[in-house]
């Protein structure tokens, strides 16, 4: 990701250069008519090339009656002065500035989406391979979250990311972050367990049922009401997940249950995240970073209690397992700890780029991006692991993913109708 403020700097530079070229041509064409250019002799404090060659520097004079605002703008930067003079001469501001900004935003968002998909797909593959030689989802989840937490602390320390000013490591912040962070842990640990017990493609199809879990939970326990259209979109989701599960050649009930628990935790996390944002003011990367820090602290003792006794033997056996299965990192043979660290960084970075991409997109674009993401991961996993999928199972997965997209559209329509009704009232 590019540093914060980089787009604005580029836009300012383009504005100055484009304005300079446009205004200089106008000044040359109107010099004789307006008399708005005078000559200043080169003196002892003049520019080196002026005193050496005996030339004088043309100075553009603003017309009388120019507003003080224009004069202030002109005195700030050379590029701003030229643009202001063009406006004073009646020349329209060049349209290339807005086009450049739009183009830059398109490139930025496209890069975020590309890396989000790429990192997510690569992480899914590396995570599955890691679990094949290190089948301890609690310990693996802690390592992945802890690496991301350490990364965010370093980025905040170096001011690469602006550190949150509304949250500190105190009792109040801990109390606010605790519920959402715990749900984040449950969602990730059970997802890792599902990866370990079943195929990546099967897990992704089951995860497509998250909207159905969300609607049912919010209706039963939070009193949320949904339109008939929203309920209708759950039919392809539930039907696709059900058919895809029953036609899975390597079906695992344990993998299915873990993926469904992950869906429930993710749905509840979405609910508590809204309250957390209002209570702390955290957004985007900082919200995810704060949850990672708290999650790493909470998960460490739990993972040690559940799987800590097997930790020394697990780390000792993992390198031999990698060698036996021919597991490499992009074709290179690396130590297990390096492989583990890279996978953990991919987990954090794909979540980070997803927050950056979603922050730039409209609700409709987000719906499309999430639906396409699952397709990309499924196709990547099938290409790498060659796990068999029946034609009916493939169609069922496609229907379930399409259902999640339709659900998003229906939920957006319900929210828009509610906002319009409140505004008219």
Image (spheres, rainbow, N blue to C red):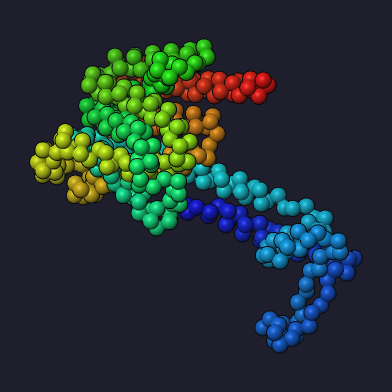
Q: Say whether residue 25 is left or right of residue 357.
A: right
Q: Quadrant of the C terminus?
A: top right
Dividing the picture into quadrants, the one containing residue 62 is bottom right
Residue occupying the point 48% across, 36% down: 278
Q: Say whether residue 391 is left or right of residue 39.
A: left
Percent across and percent down for residue 285 are: 43, 43
Percent across and percent down for residue 261 are: 30, 23
Query: Foreground: 268 or 394?
Result: 268
Q: Say whether residue 148 is left or right of residue 287.
A: left
Percent across and percent down for residue 180 are: 36, 33
* Total numbered labels placed on residues in the image: 0
Viewer can see residue 109: yes
Name of the residue lying farthest toward the front: 171
Residue occupying the point 48% across, 20% down: 407
Percent across and percent down for residue 8 are: 58, 53
Query: Foreground: 396 or 123?
Result: 123
Residue occupying the point 81% across, 68% down: 61
């Amino acid at each position: 990701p590019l540093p914060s403020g980089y787009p604005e700097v580029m836009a300012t530079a383009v504005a100055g250069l484009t304005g300079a070229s446009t205004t200089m041509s106008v000044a040359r064409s109107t010099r004789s008519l307006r008399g708005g250019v005078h000559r200043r002799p080169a003196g002892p404090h003049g520019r080196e090339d002026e005193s050496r060659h005996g030339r004088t520097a043309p100075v553009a004079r603003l017309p009388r009656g120019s507003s003080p605002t224009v004069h202030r703008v002109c005195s700030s930067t050379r590029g701003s002065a030229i643009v202001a003079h063009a406006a004073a001469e009646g020349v329209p501001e060049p349209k290339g500035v807005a086009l450049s900004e739009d183009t830059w935003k398109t490139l930025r968002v496209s890069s975020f989406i590309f890396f989000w998909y790429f990192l997510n797909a690569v992480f899914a593959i590396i995570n599955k391979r890691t679990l094949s030689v290190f089948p301890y989802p609690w310990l693996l989840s802690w390592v992945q979250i802890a690496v991301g937490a350490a990364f965010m602390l370093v980025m905040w320390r170096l001011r690469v990311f602006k550190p949150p000013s509304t949250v500190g490591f105190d009792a109040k912040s801990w109390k606010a972050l605790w519920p959402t962070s715990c749900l984040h842990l449950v969602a990730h640990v059970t997802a890792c367990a599902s990866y370990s017990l079943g195929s990546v493609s099967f897990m992704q199809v089951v995860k497509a049922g998250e909207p159905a879990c969300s609607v049912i939970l919010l209706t039963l326990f939070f009193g949320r009401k949904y339109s008939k259209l929203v309920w209708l979109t759950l039919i392809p989701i539930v039907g696709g997940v059900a058919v895809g599960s029953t036609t899975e050649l390597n079906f695992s009930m344990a993998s299915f249950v873990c993926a469904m628990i992950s869906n429930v935790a993710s749905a509840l996390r979405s609910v508590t995240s809204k309250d957390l944002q209002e209570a702390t003011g955290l957004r985007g990367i900082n919200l995810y970073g704060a949850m990672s820090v708290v999650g790493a602290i909470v998960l460490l003792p739990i993972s040690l209690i559940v799987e800590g006794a097997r930790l020394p033997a697990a780390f000792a056996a993992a390198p031999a397992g990698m060698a036996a299965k021919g597991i490499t990192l992009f074709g290179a043979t690396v130590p297990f700890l390096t492989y583990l660290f890279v996978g953990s960084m991919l987990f954090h970075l794909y979540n980070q780029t997803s927050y950056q991409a979603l922050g730039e997109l409209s609700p409709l674009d987000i719906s499309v991006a999430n639906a396409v993401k699952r397709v990309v991961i499924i196709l990547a996993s099938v290409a790498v692991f060659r796990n068999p999928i029946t034609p009916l199972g493939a169609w069922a997965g496609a229907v379930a993913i399409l259902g999640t997209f339709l659900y998003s559209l229906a939920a957006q329509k319900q929210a828009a109708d509610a906002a319009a009704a409140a505004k008219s009232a």
